[in-house]
Image (cartoon, coloured by chain):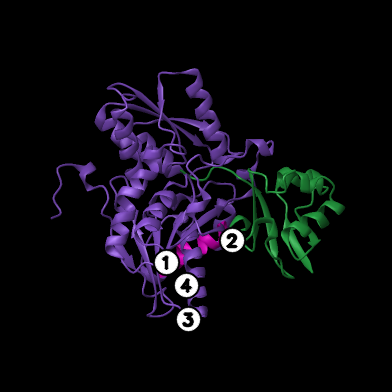
Chain colours: A green, B purple
Amino acid sequence: MSVQVRIPTILRTHTGGQKLVTGEGDSLAKLFDSLDAQHAGLKGRVVTDEGTLHRFVNVYINDEDVRFIGGLDAALADGDQVTILPAVAGGM
Amino acid sequence: MARFTDITATLGDTPLVGLPRLSPSPDIRLWVKLEGANPTGSVKDRVAAKMIEAAEDDGLLKPGSTILEPTSGNTGIAVAMLARRKGYKLIAVMPENTSLERRQLLTAFGAEIVFSPAAGGSNAAVAKARAMAAERPDLVMLNQYANPANAAAHYEGTGPELLRDLPEITHFVAGLGTTATLMGVGRYLREQAPGVQIVAAEPRYGELVYGLRNLDEGFVPELYDEKVLDRRLSVGTEDALRRTREILSEEGLFVGLSTGAVLHAGLALAREAAKAGRPADIAMLVADGGWKYLSTGAYSDGLDDAANALDGQVWA
């Protein structure tokens, strides 16, 4: 099970500058564990010590905000695309 | 009756228009609420009027007061028009990576513009405005991201109008900026028409806009309560652009780019309903017309060129 993950500029210090990395896992939590093994410190920036998503980080599976589909328990399938973005103010 | 005492009285009661050519079947209907029909051409006329009224009632705004507000354009333009009529000044703090027309309109309506850096997008504008307000207590910040009057304008206006015109509504889709449209309309529909799906279409900008120095500079509007939403879909620049052109060529509607994002999400919901064999009446909010985005090339250049040109901009 292979999942592509888009990394925002602010977290690329953990991926050696790579924009796109590949991880494994049938849930978002397992994906972050697998990513952390290759890119040390990445998980800690996205997931809090309490095991929830950081308040100022949004994660999407195929453009769907994961907070509405189970959070870190959200299921992943082969070929899914995951996007991590900092929470920013939108247009107003 | 279409006679009004003055321009501000034309606020609200915007048309709800069907999209028969984009609707996948007679059972799955798409609708758009055209907020460009408001006095200065966007949904923000509703919230500007409500926030100014609330600030006057609270005694914060008095004749001669100066309003300070971070804005990517529409709120500033709406506030500037009312401010001039009522004898207030407006200082608008705007990211430098916004379209030319928005700056020209703000200036035309008499606002002073202070630019914030392109990197960080609206976050930088909010931070700059908050710093200016801290230094100058005489400035009145309406603070649209946190002002309950912002969501109230939609709870009391947009929501009831929508349900009156489309009692069979099954889905409501709007763009996510200050989040007030979705919070206000969403809460109203939850109370009056339980079961309606409330769906956010969130613009996904180019990397420059997410250029924070650290994650702690991140921003979630004070008004935002995720419990009001059922889903939140992220829509990239190219998809938004493609849909903005599609609604123009298929339905003859000339709309701003945030509507492209909303339509992309609405069409995804329509496809899901078709697959599940369920009827649906999907209402989408059109925040503004396309006029303010002409200079970006969004309607005239090749799709790739237009997408590249918009990449670093706060286009919604």
The residue pinned by badge 2 equals B304
- Is B203 within the magenta? no
Q: Are marks 1 and 4 on the same chain?
A: yes
Image position of B199 with respect to B52: above or below: below
Residue at image location 65% in from the left, 49% down from the top: A85
- Nearer-the-camera pick, B113 or B269: B269
Amino acid carrying mark 1 in the image:
Ile
Sequence order check, earlier mark of 4 and 3 = 4
Kind of residue sitting beneath label 4: Ala
The overriding secondary structure of the stretch rendered in magenta is helix
Query: Could you say where residue B32 lies in the image, as x and y percent from the top left?
Result: 36, 63
- Residue occupying the point 50% across, 23% down: B132
First in sequence: mark 4 or mark 2?
4
Whole-Å distance between the Cαs marked 3 and 2? 36 Å
Q: What is the three-letter code of the residue carrying label 2?
A: Asp
Label 1 residue SS:
helix
From the top left corner, tell me how far across and down residue B61 is, in percent.
Answer: 32, 25
Density class for disc 1 (Cα within 10 Å; few <14, some 14-19, many ≥20) is some
Tell whether label 2 touches label 1 (CB within 8 Å): no
Residue designated by label 1: B247
Q: CA distance from mark 1 to mark 2?
A: 18 Å
**B149 and A13: which one is in front?**
B149
Residue B217, by quadrant, is top right
Chain under callout 2: B
- Residue B18 in view of the camera: yes
Residue B277's tag is 3
Q: Quadrant of the N terminus of chain B?
A: bottom left
